[in-house]
Image (cartoon, rainbow, N blue to C red):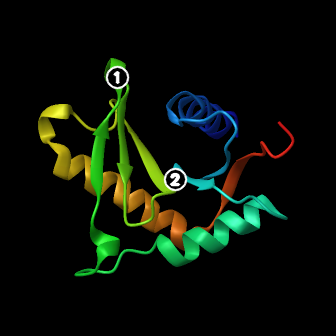
Amino acid sequence: MAGEDDEVQALVETYRKVLVGAHKSWALFAQGTCVILMDPKGDLAEQAKRILAEWGPVQAGTPSGDFEVVELEGGMGWVVTGHHPDVLNFVGADEVEAEEGEFLIGVVGRGCRETDAVSLRVVHVEDKRSA
């Protein structure tokens, strides 16, 4: 599907801009969750799946339900972080109005993380091990 490919490519370009450290390897999941691989080894998609399977599901009343919202410069959107420092979600300014508040932005990002933690469908891997 061309539309899906365009969306994936747009997210890849966004993460390339917002991630600090061009040397980092990472994996992108279907709903936009990014898992940064601080110690990349073996099959990076499988490594990212293991991390997200453990740290992605949301359980009410636990740290997995907590999130922080970081506004990105230039009005492009927000990054939503959770209880694992290397798992994050981008929420675009076209998805949520800033006036709706950080809580809604965070819930959108957390919901995407939860969906990705169930499906575990990797759509892109950025392998920087040899770079």
Provide the residue designation for mark 2.
31
Q: Nearer the viewer, residue 79 or 98?
A: 79
Measuring from the top left, give residue 47's x and y in whole percent.
71, 67
Residue displayed at 19% across by 33% down: 98
Residue displayed at 75% across by 68% down: 46
Provide the residue designation for mark 1.
73
* Marker disc for residue 92: none
Please tell me in which quadrant of the rendered image residue 101 appears: top left
**Relative side of 52 to 101, left or right:** right
SS at mark 2? loop
Direction top: furthest residue: 74
1 or 2: mark nearer the eye: 1
Measuring from the top left, give residue 5's x and y in whole percent.
68, 37
Measuring from the top left, give residue 109's x and y in whole percent.
36, 53
Q: Amino acid at mark 2?
A: Gln
Measuring from the top left, give residue 1's x and y in whole percent.
70, 40
Q: CA distance from mark 1 to mark 2?
A: 22 Å
SS at mark 1? helix
Q: Quadrant of the C terminus?
A: top right
| Lower sequence index among marks 1 and 2 | 2
Q: Nearer the viewer, residue 122 or 72?
A: 72
Q: Nearer the viewer, residue 1 or 116?
A: 116
Label 2 CA crowd tier, 10 Å (few <14, some 14–19, many 20+): many
Q: Nearer the viewer, residue 40 or 93?
A: 40
Please tell me in which quadrant of the rendered image residue 35 appears: bottom right
Quick check: 126 above or below 2? below
Q: Amino acid at mark 1?
A: Glu
Label 1 CA crowd tier, 10 Å (few <14, some 14–19, many 20+): few
**Relative side of 16 to 72, left or right:** right
